[in-house]
Image: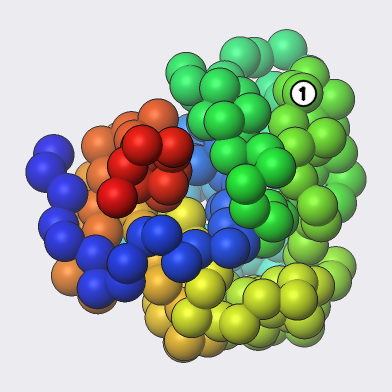
Amino acid sequence: MSSRNSRLDPRIIKAIFWDNDGVLVNTERLYFRATKQALAKVGVDLTQELFAELFLNQSRGAWHLAEEKGVSKYDIESLRAERNEIYGSMLRVEPFGIPGVETTLSQLKGHLTMGIVTSSWREHFELIHRSTNFIPYVDFVLTREDYTHSKPDPEPYLRALECVDVEKQDCLVIEDSERGLRSAKGAGLTCWVIPNELTKTADFSQADKVLSDITEIPTHLLGRNRPGHD
């Protein structure tokens, strides 16, 4: 996948806001499987394509599909809790690493302020990062409890701006989904996207750059700043 030219000189980037699921960890596929398993109990067949549209584009979720089958709101809450339990169990036993993430974070550490801005609830976020070494690389983390309106609303990234002493034109967001891209652009931020299996067919025409791999980022940001480079 080729990169489109950024509209921002990468040499001025001073802060990066990372999405978590799909960018730093390959957990979206587990969330899909857990949700699919829970909804199957009430006769809803959640496909990967529908999941991507409802969760990663619209940020609507899929519980309305159960309502359409006559499932009560009480039973839907029970299904949601069951999905969360299934997801947590998967996080404890299944691999979800993405090659090159820790190397990328280590290369950028000390050069820029870095934070994670995620739609995950803190319980799941902490469970995920018990098995990674990523948290020491970042300066702050915002989980779903830290803001009122989730992506695609711009609030998560507006809150991130409050966490850094950096002008918004000097900040960069790394995302993997349409909802994340819209959130970043709504906050007035530059956004680079790394599509994955679930989001590869999404509309990323508003992205400032589309990358194939997270390991490309240090080259784009640091390549021109090394000694001996103009």
Q: Residue 187: x percent and y percent?
A: 53, 85
Tell me if residue 135 comes above or below residue 140 in the rendering: above
- Where's residue 79, x and y in %? 72, 50
Residue at left 50%, top 42%? Answer: 23
Near-viewer residue (80 or 122) = 122
Which residue is farthest front? 228
Residue 84, picture quadrant: top right
Along the horizontal axis of the image, is 206 left or right of 105?
A: left
Residue nearer the viewer, 59 or 136: 136
Q: Residue 122: percent from the left, percent from the top? A: 85, 51
Q: Nearer the viewer, residue 105 or 226?
A: 226
**Disc 1 element:** loop
The residue depicted at 49 percent of the width and 63 percent of the height is: 13
Q: Locate the N terminus by quadrant.
A: top left
- Residue at image position (47%, 18%) is 99
Q: Which residue is mark 1?
A: 133
The three-letter code of the residue at mark 1 reads Asn
Q: Is residue 88 visible?
A: no
Within-10-Å neighbours for mark 1: few <14, some 14–19, many 20+: few
Q: Position of residue 108 (x, y in %)?
A: 58, 39
Number of numbered discs visible in the structure rendering: 1
Q: How is the image coloured?
A: rainbow
Q: Is residue 186 left or right of residue 127?
A: left
